[in-house]
C-alpha cells in the first residue's frame, strides 16, 4: 500500500454551507419540536402510560447502535490488522462519536425532566443497566476521541493499536448494554431474552456500516476523490455479511420463541396479527431491510453498481429503523401477560381486553425530534471532515490495495 | 384518651413516627383482595383513590383528544374483569402497584428515584426522577403512570409534577400520620380489601391471608408481592 495522504473535505463553499444550512434547519426544527413537547408535556405526543417509549426512542436507539457499528471499520484495521481498512479508520471514529451524540441528544430530550440530566450524571443506581450505559456512552466518546488522536498525531501512532483494541472491547460492551435494556425486562413477553444483546451487536455492525458507506461515498463523490471498485467491493461485501448475520439472529430469535407455547401469542402478534407491527416486520425489517439489500449486494452485476450499493445501504438503514420500531413499540403494544389461563374481558386501563394491542400513533413532534438527531449527527460529521483531515485524498485501488488484506 | 379533669378527656392523637425517625423494617405493609367479595361494576376504590391522591384534580389539556387522554391520564388503581379460559368463571378485581419485595422498577431506575422503603413500600422520589420511564417498561403490572401534562393544583400530601412517574403509595401519607388504612380499603363497602402489617401475625391482613388461599400475580417472577388475591 502506498503512503496515504489525508486532506480536509474540499467541496466548494456554497455547496458546503448550503448543506450545513439544510441540516441546521432540520436540527432547529427538531429543537423547536422538543421545546413544544417539553413546554406542554408529553400529552402532545402519541405516547401514553401503555406505550411509554415512542418514536424518539426508535431514532435514539438506532443512532446509538449504529454509532458503535460505525467504529467497526476502524477496528477491522487496527484490531484485525487489515491494512486496507486503515485509511478508512479516521472517518469511522468520527462517525462513531457523532452518531452517538445524535442518539444521546434525542434520548435526553425525550426525558420527562431533561433539565435533570445533572441528576442522572451524579446519582447512580448501579443495578440499573441505564446507569451503566451512562458510563459506557461517555467512556466510548472519550476513548474514541483518544483513538482518533493516536491515528491523526504521528507521534502517538504507536499507541493506536492498543487504544483501538480498548475501543473495540468497549463498543462490544456498549452495544451489549443497549441490547440489555430490553434483555433485562422480565415483565414483557417480547423482551427478556439473552439473545437481545448479541442481536443488537450484529445489528450495530450492519447499521453502522450502512451509514458509513453512505457518508464515505457521498463525501468522496462530491469532492471528486477516487474510490476504487476493489475497496468498495470489500466494504459492500462486509455489509452483506452483516445483514446476513442479522437475518440469522432474527430467525433464531423467532424460532426460539415459537418453540415455547408461552410465547405463541406474542409471535402470532408480531408475525401474523399485529397489523402495523406485522407489516413493519415483514416489509420493513425482513424484505426491505434484509432480503433486498442482500440480493443487491451479492448480485454479480448489481453489486458492483454504485447506485445499487447506495440503494442497498439506504434500505439497510430503513430496515434498521423498522426493526427497532418493531422491537421497541411492538414489544410494548403487546399486552402484559398478567393472568395466564384467563382472558381480560373488561379493564379500566387498557390491559389488553380480549388480547387487544395497545394503541400508538406517532406524532409529528416526536418524529421531528428523532430526525433532528439524525441531522445533528450528519452536521457534526460534515463540519468535522471539513475542518480536520479525516478523509484520505484517494482510495483508488492502487492506493488502498484491497487485494492485500 | 387522656383524662384532664373528672369527666373531661383529650382525644389522643394517632401515634405517628416522628418525621426525623427513619422508617424501619419492623413492619411490612400488605393487602389482600378477596375477589369473591369484589363486586362487578363497582369502582368505589378507584374513585376514592383518585380523590385521596388528587388524581381527580387533573384536567384534560385543552386540545387533547378524549381517547388519547384516557390513555395518558394517571391512574393508580383500576378495575379488571377476567374470564377463566377453561371454566368461564368471571372474576373482578382491582389492580395497583403490588409493592414487590424485589421490585423490577427499583432495579432498573438509573438514578435510584424508584426506591423501596424499609417497610416495603415501592415509591418514587419526585426530586430525582428524570422521567425516563424505564420503570414503566419494567413493571409487570402496568401499575405506573407518567404525568403527561402541566399540573395546576398540587396536593401537599401527594406531590406531583409534569414529567415524573408515580404510582400507588398505599396512601403513605396516611401511614406516616399513624393511620392504618388506605383510601381504597375505606371506600370498599364489600370488605374486599384488607390492609395491614404482614409482619404482625395478629393483623387483620395476616389473619385473612392465613385463612384464605391466595396468590400473587405473576408468581413466576418471584417478586414476593405485598398484594395478594384470593380465588383467581
Image (cartoon, rainbow, N blue to C red):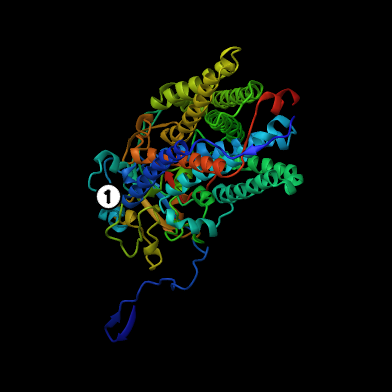
Tell me if residue B108 can be seen: yes
Q: Where is residue A81 in the image (x, y as percent from the top left)?
A: 75, 33
Q: Mark 1 lies on which chain?
A: B
Secondary structure at numbered mark 1: helix
Q: Where is residue A350 in the image (x, y as percent from the top left)?
A: 35, 38
Label 1: how many Cα within 10 Å (few below 14, some 14–19, many 20+): some
Tell me if residue B190 can be seen: no
Residue carrying label 1: B44
Q: Residue at x 25, y 43 (%)?
A: B64
**The C terminus of chain A: image quadrant:** top right
A3 and B52: which is toward the camera: A3
Rendering quarter of residue A158: top right
Residue located farthest toward the bottom when viewing the structure as drawn: B5
Q: Which residue is drawn at 45% across and 21% down?
A: A283
Determine whether A212 is above or below B225 in the image. above
Determine whether A336 is above or below B26 in the image. above
A32 and A345: which is toward the camera: A32
Amino acid at each position: 500500500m502506498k503512503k496515504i495522504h489525508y486532506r480536509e473535505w474540499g467541496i466548494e463553499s456554497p455547496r458546503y454551507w448550503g448543506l450545513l444550512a439544510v441540516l441546521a434547519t432540520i436540527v432547529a426544527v427538531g429543537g423547536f419540536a422538543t421545546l413544544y413537547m417539553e413546554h406542554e408535556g408529553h400529552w402532545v405526543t402519541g405516547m401514553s402510560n401503555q406505550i411509554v417509549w415512542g418514536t424518539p426512542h426508535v431514532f435514539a436507539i438506532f443512532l446509538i447502535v449504529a454509532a458503535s457499528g460505525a467504529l467497526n471499520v476502524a477496528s477491522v484495521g487496527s484490531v484485525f490488522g487489515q491494512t486496507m481498512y486503515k485509511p478508512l479508520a479516521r472517518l469511522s471514529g468520527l462517525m462513531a462519536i457523532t452518531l452517538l451524540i445524535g442518539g444521546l441528544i434525542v434520548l435526553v430530550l425525550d426525558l420527562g425532566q431533561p433539565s435533570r440530566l445533572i441528576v442522572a450524571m451524579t446519582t447512580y443506581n448501579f443495578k440499573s443497566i441505564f446507569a451503566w450505559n451512562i458510563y459506557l456512552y461517555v467512556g466510548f466518546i472519550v476513548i474514541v476521541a483518544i483513538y482518533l488522536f493516536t491515528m491523526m498525531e504521528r507521534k502517538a501512532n504507536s499507541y493506536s493499536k492498543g487504544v483501538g483494541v480498548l475501543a473495540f472491547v468497549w463498543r462490544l460492551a456498549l452495544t451489549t448494554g443497549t441490547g440489555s435494556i430490553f434483555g433485562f425486562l422480565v415483565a414483557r413477553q417480547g423482551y427478556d431474552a439473552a439473545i437481545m444483546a448479541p442481536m443488537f451487536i450484529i445489528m450495530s455492525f450492519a447499521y453502522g456500516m450502512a451509514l458509513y458507506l453512505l457518508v464515505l461515498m457521498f463525501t468522496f463523490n462530491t469532492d471528486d476523490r477516487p474510490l476504487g471498485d476493489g475497496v468498495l467491493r470489500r466494504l459492500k461485501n462486509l455489509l452483506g455479511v452483516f445483514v446476513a448475520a442479522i437475518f440469522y439472529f432474527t430467525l433464531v430469535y423467532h424460532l426460539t420463541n415459537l418453540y415455547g407455547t408461552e410465547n405463541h401469542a406474542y409471535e402470532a402478534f408480531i408475525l401474523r396479527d399485529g397489523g402495523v407491527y406485522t407489516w413493519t416486520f415483514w416489509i420493513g425489517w425482513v424484505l426491505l431491510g434484509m432480503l433486498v439489500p442482500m440480493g443487491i449486494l451479492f448480485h454479480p452485476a448489481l453489486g458492483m453498481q454504485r447506485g445499487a450499493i447506495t440503494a442497498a445501504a439506504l434500505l439497510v438503514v430503513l430496515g434498521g429503523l423498522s426493526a427497532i420500531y418493531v422491537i421497541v413499540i411492538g414489544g410494548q403494544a403487546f399486552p402484559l401477560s398478567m393472568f395466564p389461563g384467563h382472558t381480560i374481558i373488561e379493564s379500566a386501563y387498557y390491559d389488553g381486553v380480549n388480547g387487544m394491542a395497545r394503541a400508538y400513533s406517532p406524532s409529528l413532534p416526536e418524529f421531528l425530534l428523532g430526525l433532528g438527531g439524525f441531522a445533528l449527527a450528519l452536521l457534526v460529521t460534515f463540519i468535522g471532515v471539513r475542518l480536520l483531515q479525516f478523509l484520505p485524498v484517494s482510495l483508488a485501488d492502487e492506493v488502498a490495495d484491497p487485494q492485500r488484506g | 384518651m387522656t383524662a384532664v379533669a373528672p369527666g373531661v378527656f383529650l382525644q389522643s392523637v394517632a401515634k405517628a413516627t416522628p418525621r426525623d425517625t427513619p422508617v424501619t423494617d419492623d413492619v411490612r405493609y400488605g393487602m389482600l383482595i378477596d375477589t369473591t367479595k369484589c363486586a362487578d361494576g363497582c369502582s368505589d376504590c378507584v374513585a376514592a383513590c383518585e380523590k385521596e391522591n388528587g388524581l381527580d384534580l387533573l384536567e384534560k389539556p385543552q386540545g387533547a383528544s378524549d381517547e388519547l387522554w384516557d390513555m395518558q391520564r394517571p391512574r393508580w388503581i383500576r378495575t379488571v374483569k377476567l374470564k377463566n379460559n377453561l371454566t368461564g368463571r368471571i372474576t373482578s378485581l382491582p389492580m395497583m402497584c403490588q409493592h414487590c419485595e424485589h421490585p423490577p422498577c427499583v432495579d432498573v431506575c438509573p438514578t435510584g428515584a424508584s426506591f423501596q422503603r424499609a417497610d416495603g413500600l415501592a415509591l418514587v422520589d419526585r426530586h430525582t426522577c428524570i422521567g425516563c420511564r424505564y420503570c414503566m417498561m419494567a413493571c409487570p403490572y402496568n401499575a405506573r403512570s407518567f404525568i403527561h401534562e402541566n399540573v395546576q393544583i398540587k396536593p401537599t400530601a401527594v406531590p406531583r409534577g409534569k414529567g415524573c412517574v408515580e404510582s400507588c403509595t398505599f396512601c403513605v401519607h396516611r401511614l406516616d400520620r399513624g393511620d392504618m388504612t388506605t383510601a381504597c380499603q375505606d371506600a370498599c363497602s364489600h370488605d374486599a380489601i384488607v390492609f395491614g402489617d404482614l409482619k404482625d401475625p395478629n393483623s387483620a391482613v395476616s389473619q385473612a391471608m392465613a385463612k384464605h388461599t391466595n396468590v400473587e400475580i405473576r408468581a413466576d417472577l418471584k417478586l414476593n408481592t405485598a398484594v395478594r388475591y384470593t380465588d383467581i
